[in-house]
Image (spheres, helix red, strand yellow):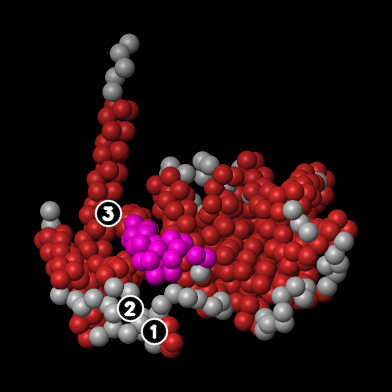
Amino acid sequence: MKAWLHSVRVLVWKDLLQEWRSRDILTSMLAFAVLSLFIFNYALELSPINRSEIAPGIVWVVMVFAGTLGLNRSFTAEQDQGCFEGLIMAVPDLSAIYFAKLLTNLLMMVFLAVLVIPIYSILYNQSLFNWAFFGVLALGAWGYSAAGTLISSMTVQTRMRDLLLPVLLFPLLLPVNMAVVKSCGVLLGSVAGQDINGWLNLLLVYDAVVTMLSIMVFEYVIQE
Amino acid sequence: MSYLSILAFALVLFAFVRVLFFTPVEQTMGLVQKVFYFHMSAAWVGMLAFLAAAAFGILYLSRKDLKWDTLTAASVEVGLLFTIICILSGMIWARPIWNTWWTWDPRLTTVTIMAFTYIAFILLRRGVDNPARRARFSAVYAIIGFISVPLTFFSARLLRTIHPVVFGGGETEMNLNAQMVATLFISLAAFTVLYIALLLQRARLMAQQEELNQQMAAVDSDYDWGE
């Protein structure tokens, strides 16, 4: 267990350091997210009244779309440099690789949320600073990263690569999308106070089930 | 033509005749309600096929025999076909009853998302050339896709639905008399046999296709290009 935790920590640190040195992915994700916010403004003609109702939907969709940029890159370095074999030999258990990638993707998504929330609040003059809202976004980001890490570890080994990731991933995300948008709507007060426990339970169950299942099948994805 | 296929054909024909001529017309909805028997049977086979695909996927991962991979792929294809039949027949029913071809009801949305999951499965297979890798990825995606189906259906239960419920559904439950219930079960049985027949035919065709590809490749590499 100790060796496992150690290798997860080293792998996360390696990915974050690599990203910090180039900052390719995060800058692209952020630029894409801000551009999407502008596109939504034109596409939906957001008036102050309807904008408060759809804020959680817009923030989540922006995160999901920008997140695919990061997920697509998640395994490309290993694949292109041929260091999967090295990684497989270096870790005590293959689940450490999956878990480390999951954490890296989750950290990127949370970092994206930290940047998108204030930008949205300024551009649309509506404060989204709400810890519960942020917590639900983080839970949603966990489910998103758990499914996304597994799918991107497969798509990176296919002929179509980036093309395939959203097609494979988005149908699996329906429960997360619904739970995040519905419960955030209540938390931000745009939908009259409903009970959100059902949605939060769904989100927790999804996160747990997809993470466990991915850990179980991950070895079949990366080992020949 | 196997005996199973002939049996499936006879059963479906029998169910069809029974639905049309020997089942009473529903009082409020009229003739269009008859689409329901095949609609529900198609929905059932769609679910069954995806459950079977996940089970075949698990078998492949534990046994590493490409036979299970062929069955996984065949089951998804057949299941997708039946799910599309289910969606289209539902639309035919919804047009006169709900006065619209489509509505964003949770039941409709979740079934369609399920169909998209399995369209993605077929795209994934097309993107991988190495048969062993294709088999591993197919198995993994069939399993994770199937796990997301109950979660998706659970999320739909948190929303209000206008879709009728056949068994144990309280106020939206349908009232079927004994003859209608008998017809429903005959259709379900007929479609189940049809599913098994189609699954085996498709799997056999896939295996033959694979064999043909290998022989063509062997001929290609043996061929002396002169000089």
Question: Would residue B54 be seen by someone viewing this image from the given angle?
Answer: no
Judged from the image, the secondary structure of the residue bearing numbered disc 3 is helix
Q: Mark 3 points at which residue?
A: B203
Q: Residues within 10 Å of mark 3 (few under 14, many from 20)?
A: many
Q: Tell me the subunit letter for badge 3.
A: B
Q: Name the residue under label 1.
A: B173
Q: Could you tell me residue A33's position as x and y percent?
A: 76, 51
Answer whether labels 2 and 1 touch (C-beta < 8 Å): no
Q: Residue at x 26, y 63 (%)?
A: B195
Q: Tell me the subunit letter for badge 2.
A: B
Q: Do labels 2 and 1 share a chain?
A: yes
- Left or right of B184: which side holds B6? left
Q: Is the magenta stretch mostly helix, strand or loop?
A: helix
Q: How crowded is mark 2: few (under 14 residues within 10 Å), some or many (20 or more)?
A: few
- Left or right of A209: which side holds A24? right
Q: Tell me the subunit letter for badge 1.
A: B
Q: Could you tell me residue B111's position as x and y percent?
A: 45, 65
Q: Name the residue under label 2.
A: B28
Q: Which residue is drawn at 43% across and 88% down?
A: B170
What residue type is disc 2 on? Thr
What residue type is disc 1 on? Glu
Judged from the image, the secondary structure of the residue bearing numbered disc 2 is loop
User: Rounded to the nearest whole Å, what is the CA distance between mark 3 and mark 1?
Assistant: 38 Å
Boundaries of the magenta span = B81-104
Judged from the image, the secondary structure of the residue bearing numbered disc 1 is loop
What residue type is disc 3 on? Ala
- Left or right of B119: which side holds B222? left
